[in-house]
Structure formats: C-alpha cells, structure tokens
C-alpha cells in the first residue's frame, strides 16, 4: 500500500514540479547561509531576511504600479527592493556581530523577531484600515521562464521547464557560488577567514570587510528568495509567510556540510519530502512528512551519515592581535 | 591558565558605610545594563511610532505618549488587567527559567517552544484519553507527564551535545519544528480533533483543568470576584514556586555550582572532576521540564484546546530568550523581566484600541532589547561615563556562540578572558 502510493507519487510530474519549486525557494537562503558561515559568521536569520524580502517585494511592486509604472518595471523594482531589504537586515546582523562583537545567535534571533514584528506592523500602517495586503494580479507576479516548445515535453516539461524565472536564476547563482567558494582566490580567502582569521589577517586579508560582504550577500540572496516566494509562488504577502523555510534552509546548510552543492542536494531531498506530501495524502501522514528535513539533519548531526563540522572560526568575533 | 581569585573580605575589614556603598554598586551593576537596554529599546520604539504616525487624529508625540501610557494601564492599570497580565506571565516564567538554566551551563536553549509544544500535547492526550479519572488524579498526572515529555525533548539535546558534540542551537531548532509538525499531526488526527474540522482539539473536560485563583480567594476571604473577569489560574503559584526552585538549584546546590563552572570554563570544570556530560544532559532535561510544564499549565489553566499551527506561530520561545537575558539569568531577574515582557504583551489590546497602534510594535521593542543586550554596547558607553556611574565588570552569562572543535581563548567586551572548549573534545586529552 505504502510503496504503491509512493511509486504513484514519484512518477507524477506534479510531484517533481513541487519538489523543484520548494528546492528553488530553499537554495537561495541556503547559499546565503553557506557563504556567511564559511566566512565565520553564524547566520540563523535567513528566515527573517527572507520575510523582509517578501514584504518589500510586494509593497514596492504595488507602490510602483500605483504611481503608474509599467507592470514589468514594477515587478523588477519589487525584486530589487526585496534584495536590498534582505541585504539591509543582513547589514544590521553584520554590524552587530562583527563591529560590536555581539553574540551572533542572539543577533540572529533578534533579526528574526524584528522582521516578523516590523513587516506585520508596516502592513497595518501601509494598507488602508490595516486589513492586509491584497492578492497581486497575474501581471504583477514573476512569470515562468518562456522555454517555448520545451515546456510541453511530457513529464519533464512541467517539472523542469515551467518553473519561475527566479528558479533558473537560483540555479545560476548556485553554480556561481560553488565556483566562487572553491575555485577562486576570493573563495579561498573567505574560507581562510572562516577557518583561521588570524592567519588570514597576517596574509593580508581584510577579515572584517570580507565577513561584511559575506553576511550581506546572505541577506541579498535571502531577500531574493523572499521575492520568489511572494511575487512568484504565492502572489500575496501574509504575516509570517515564510513559515520556517529559513530554518529549513539552515538545516540544508548543515546537512550539505557547508558547501553550495551539498546544500543544493539537501534542498532537493527536503523538497522531495514536500513534493510527495500531496501524493501521500491518502496515507494520512499529514504534517508528519514535514518533519523529514529536520529528522534528516539531526541524523546527519549525530554522525550517522558522515559527521558535519562547521568552519573552525564560525561564530567567533575576530579580534586583531588575539591568538 | 590562571583563574583570577578574589580574596573574600571578612566582615570586620569593612566599615558599614563602605559595605552600603558596595551594595549599591552591586545593585547598580546588576540593574544598569538591563535598564538601559529597555530604555533604549523604548526610545527606539518611540521613534518607530514617530516615523509611522499610526493615529493621524493626534500629533505624533501625543501618539507616542498615548501608546506607552495605554501599554502601561492596559497591563497594570486595574486588578482585571493585572490578572490578564499574570495569565501571560505564567507560562513565560516557566519557559524563561528553562532558557536561563541552560544559559547557566553555557548552553543556548532555543528549543523552549518545541519543549512547550511536546509538554502541552502530552498533557492534552492524557486529559482527553482518561476523561473518567477524578480531578485529583488526572491533573497531577497530566502535569507530571508534561514535565516528563519536556524533559525527554530537552534531554535529547543534552545527550546529543554531550556524547555526539552536536551544537545545541542547531538541534533545538530542528527539534522545535519536529515538535510543531508532530503536534499538528496529532491535533488534526481524528482521535483528538474537534468535530466540524475547525483545526482544534476537543475541549478538555472540567476535571482536567486548573481552577482560577479567585475561586480560592472567594472561599478564603468571602469575596464575590467573578472568575470570568479575573482569569488567572492557580498555575501562577506553580510559577512562583518554580522560581524558588530555580534559585535553590542554581545557588544552593552542588549541581548549580557545577553547571556554572561548566558554563564559564569547561576546561576548569573538567580538571576539577565535574561530570560534564552527565550535567549537560541533566541541565537540558531540567530546562525541557520547565518548558514542558509551561505548555501544560497554559493548556489546562487557560486555553482548554490546542489549535493547529498554534505552536509554530507563537513567539513564546523567543520571548523566553529575551526574558532570560534581560533578567541576567537570575531568579529575581527572570521574575521582573517576565513581568515586563508579559506586561508589554497584555498591554497591546488597549494600545491597539485606544492609541491605534498595531500590537506588533511590541515585537519590535523586544527585538531591540535583544540587540542592545547582545551588542554589549555598554562597555563602549561606560568608558565615556564618569566614575560614579560605572556598572558591571562582570562578564555576562551569555554563552559563546562557538561551534568550534578545539580550544582557544578570546576576550569578550569586558576584557575578561573566556575559555572556549567543546565538551566532546575534553575526552581526547585524557
């Protein structure tokens, strides 16, 4: 019975469409997390940065539309605004944890809380009589990428070639990030800063600047994911709409052993859990399936599928001159 | 590495005046940081109101004044309001103690929300299953079961930390979401869910609930207070007892001393022969027990039903961290700061109704308090202050965010050396 339903789910192209969509949403903040943690700054605030991005994308798109800009321009500005908003949140995290040498976990929690509070608060202020943001019309949403005839290939067409534009952008960023981190000079520096900042400093690397850039790029990527969620998938902004996706991305970072490709594979696995949940409805498993990403990550942490170890200086503020 | 030893002064060596001055300094040292953090957060909140100006019928400064006065009168302005505030404060005390005791051992318990969910769900399952049991048996069983369930959920974290070296921040986040989804599954399962598909469990029977405080007050003093107006239930007494227990554990037992040593210097603890692994497990289990009980009392005293996604949407776990940090993980500090945050929460109803300000402003203030505490900007400020207002030289009890295998010594903002050792690595040196 179970395997029958599972098999039926696995050969349905809807499952794979949902899987890839969910994975695409996760991969951006997960990459942000990888970059930030590799540079030695713990980031558990992807959730908040993503939520801020989602909020900014919808609000800016609507505002630009209302002042009479053409639709596609409004959407592009909305996405750019989302990226900036996520980056701004990350800037706070960077400032507090790099300059003030704050506890990065507390700072991350504070970012998550302030994102939740500020977005809900501003929805109340900015919408007439505070009744919430209206659903966006189709022409103000992010479109699917026009693959033309490829989109009508049976099975593969729906799963691979009918995704949102941001999905393909995320794929590009994924390979870009993996290349940047492990094949370039700057990637080497980032990893050095995360493993042994004193040595990197001695070798002439600007530790603070590099950490700033890495934390901020984690915010930019999370903000972009927020725009994908709000403008691409849901078409609306709701309070706390990220609903733990940022934390699944964090799980993917750890499960993927702090590499871009590893995180992407983790996102795919987690996405499959989500994609199958529709097909497995008959089994009455309900929300139990949603626990899979977290259970997998726990198992990985315990070391059953290869222990996962963070960069050596992850979470430690850098003090010039300390041993 | 040298541990600075402070020679204890005997009473004879100190004059009365200097001991008074010392006492004032001590109090000032303990209160200065938190009070300033709150003050700055409130000022920043005022700036948010000033910029957004939600109530256009009055001028923005009047709006700020209205916001904060209604926030206060709405939480402590009348006996009913105080009672409503205590309703919020009760579970907050338990979860904050949970976070605080973990902090003492240098552990970051982000998992209060998950432990609370597991505790509440366990109590609910028992309450809805053994409905025929008499109250005197059912209620204690539910409370004990919730304590046990929370302890297991927290204990897992301690176990993974001590024996596998898994960082507790990550495991608690993972276990939180597992708890949220498992409870959601149970809440929506046909056995417990209410008919008509409202996404709620059946209401607990009367013999599975905690009675309101006023029942006893009325009986004792012969008053006629209405339990629907004064909603606070007897679990507030449990919370006060829990605070005393927390104080006793942390400052009057060997265990409390040992976890403090572990939190401040694991290496010293190791060489002093303190059983680090066992204590790490125990402290997380106790932390989980506090949170599990929080879930049970708020279910049995107030909510009566559990609703779908209720646990994942609530901010209790974050609130608890803010309270524990603001209260500097002391028993009295937790009491005061949970009254503060509970007051902020329960005052929002009036703030929204009268000053027309969205309740989420309180979340913003809470986050700002956390930022100001986390940033430890106070040492920077202190240097600019004249000598007589100097406060805390103590290192804060915030554990270091290290996920590092290996040992290294860094300085915190106060200039005190902190040692960072992963517990699992201590074995290797033997």
Image (cartoon, helix red, strand yellow):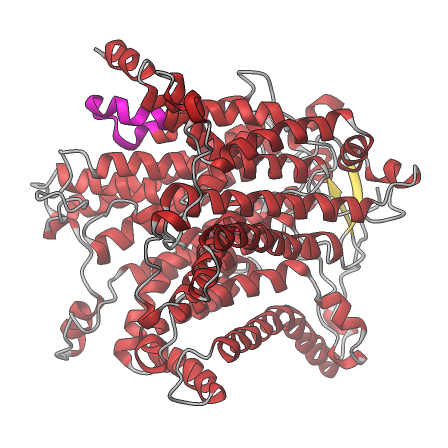
**In the image shown, does A27 or B412 lie closer to the viewer?**
A27
- Identify the image quadrant of residue B223: bottom left
Asked if B328 appears above or below B400 in the picture, the reply is below
Q: Is residue A30 magenta?
A: no
Work out whether residue B400 can be spotted: no
* Residue at the image position 45 percent from the left and 70 percent from the top: B340
| Quarter of the image that includes the N terminus of chain B | top right
* Residue at the image position 67 percent from the left and 30 percent from the top: A176
Asked if A164 appears above or below A159 in the picture, the reply is below
Please indicate whether residue B202 sits to the left or right of residue B150 in the image.
left
Q: Position of residue B384 (x, y in %)?
A: 80, 76
Please indicate whether residue A22 sits to the left or right of residue B389 in the image.
left
Q: Position of residue A143 (x, y in %)?
A: 43, 40
| Quarter of the image that includes the C terminus of chain B | top right
Please indicate whether residue B297 sits to the left or right of residue B221 in the image.
right
Asked if B117 appears above or below B61 in the picture, the reply is above
Q: Position of residue A251 (x, y in %)?
A: 52, 32
**In the image shown, does A266 or B115 lie closer to the viewer?**
A266
Q: Position of residue B174 (x, y in %)?
A: 46, 35
- Identify the image quadrant of residue B82: bottom left
Span colored in magenta: A274-289
**In the image shown, does A227 or B301 lie closer to the viewer?**
A227
């Amino acid at each position: 019975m179970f395997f029958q339903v599972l098999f039926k789910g696995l050969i349905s192209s809807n499952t794979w469409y949902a899987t890839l969509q969910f994975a695409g949403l996760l991969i951006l903040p997960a990459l942000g997390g990888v970059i930030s943690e590799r540079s030695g700054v713990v980031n558990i605030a992807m959730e908040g940065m993503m939520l801020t991005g989602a909020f900014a994308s919808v609000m800016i798109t609507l505002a630009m539309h209302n002042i009479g800009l053409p639709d596609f321009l409004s959407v592009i500005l909305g996405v750019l605004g989302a990226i900036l908003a996520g980056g701004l949140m990350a800037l706070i995290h960077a400032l507090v944890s790099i300059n003030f040498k704050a506890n990065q976990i507390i700072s991350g929690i504070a970012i998550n809380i302030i994102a939740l509070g500020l977005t809900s608060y501003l929805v109340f202020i900015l919408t007439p009589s505070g009744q919430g943001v209206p659903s966006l019309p189709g022409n103000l949403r992010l479109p699917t990428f026009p693959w033309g005839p490829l989109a009508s290939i049976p099975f593969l067409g729906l799963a691979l070639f009918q995704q949102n534009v941001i999905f393909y952008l995320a794929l590009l960023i994924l390979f870009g990030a993996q290349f940047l981190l492990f094949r370039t000079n700057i990637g080497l520096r980032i990893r050095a800063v995360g493993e042994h900042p004193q040595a990197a400093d001695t070798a002439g690397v600007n530790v603070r600047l590099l950490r700033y850039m890495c934390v901020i790029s984690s915010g930019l990527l999370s903000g972009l994911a927020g725009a994908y969620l709000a403008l691409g998938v849901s078409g609306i902004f709701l309070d706390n709409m990220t609903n733990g996706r940022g934390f699944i991305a964090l799980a993917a970072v750890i499960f993927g052993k702090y590499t871009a490709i590893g995180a992407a594979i983790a996102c795919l696995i987690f996405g499959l859990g989500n994609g199958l949940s529709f097909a497995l409805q008959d089994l009455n498993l309900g929300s139990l399936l949603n626990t899979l990403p977290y259970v997998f990550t726990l198992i990985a942490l315990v070391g059953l599928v290869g222990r996962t170890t963070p960069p050596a200086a992850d979470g430690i503020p850098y003090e010039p001159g300390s041993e | 590495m040298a541990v600075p030893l402070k020679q204890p002064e005997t009473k004879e060596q100190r004059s009365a005046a200097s001991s008074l001055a010392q006492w004032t300094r001590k109090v000032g040292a303990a209160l200065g940081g938190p009070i300033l953090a709150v003050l700055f957060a409130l000022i920043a909140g005022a700036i948010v109101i000033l910029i957004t100006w939600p109530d256009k019928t009055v001028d923005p400064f009047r709006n700020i004044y209205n916001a904060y006065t209604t926030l206060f009168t709405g939480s402590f302005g009348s006996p009913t309001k105080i009672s409503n505030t205590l309703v919020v404060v009760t579970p907050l005390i338990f979860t904050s103690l949970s976070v605080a005791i973990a902090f003492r051992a240098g552990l970051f318990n982000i998992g209060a929300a998950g432990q609370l969910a597991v505790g509440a769900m366990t109590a609910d399952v028992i309450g809805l299953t053994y409905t025929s049991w008499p109250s005197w048996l059912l209620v204690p069983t539910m409370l004990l079961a919730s304590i046990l369930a929370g302890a297991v959920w927290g204990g897992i974290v301690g176990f993974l930390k001590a024996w596998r070296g898994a960082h507790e921040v990550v495991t608690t986040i993972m276990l939180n979401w597992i708890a949220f989804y498992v409870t959601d599954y149970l809440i929506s399962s046909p056995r417990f869910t209410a008919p008509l598909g409202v996404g709620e469990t059946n209401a607990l029977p009367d013999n599975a609930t905690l009675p309101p405080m006023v029942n006893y007050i009325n009986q004792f003093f012969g008053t006629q207070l209405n339990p629907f107006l004064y909603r606070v239930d007897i679990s507030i007494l449990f919370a006060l007892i829990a605070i005393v227990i927390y104080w006793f554990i942390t400052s009057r037992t060997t265990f409390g001393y040992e976890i403090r040593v572990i939190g401040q210097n694991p290496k010293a603890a190791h060489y002093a022969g303190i059983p680090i692994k066992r204590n790490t497990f125990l402290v997380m289990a106790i932390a989980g027990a506090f949170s599990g009980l929080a879930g049970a009392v708020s279910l049995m005293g107030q909510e009566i039903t559990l609703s779908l996604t209720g646990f994942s949407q609530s901010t209790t776990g974050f609130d608890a961290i803010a309270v524990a940090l603001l209260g500097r993980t002391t028993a009295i500090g937790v009491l005061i700061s949970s009254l503060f945050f509970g007051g902020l929460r329960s005052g929002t109803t009036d703030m929204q109704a009268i000053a027309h300000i969205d309740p989420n402003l309180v979340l913003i203030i809470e986050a700002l308090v956390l930022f100001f505490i986390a940033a430890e900007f106070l040492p920077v400020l202190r240097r600019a202050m004249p000598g007589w207002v100097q406060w805390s030289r103590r290192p804060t009890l915030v554990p270091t965010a290290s996920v590092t295998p290996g040992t290294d010594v860094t300085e915190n903002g106060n200039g005190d050396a902190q040692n960072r050792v992963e517990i699992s690595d201590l074995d290797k040196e033997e």
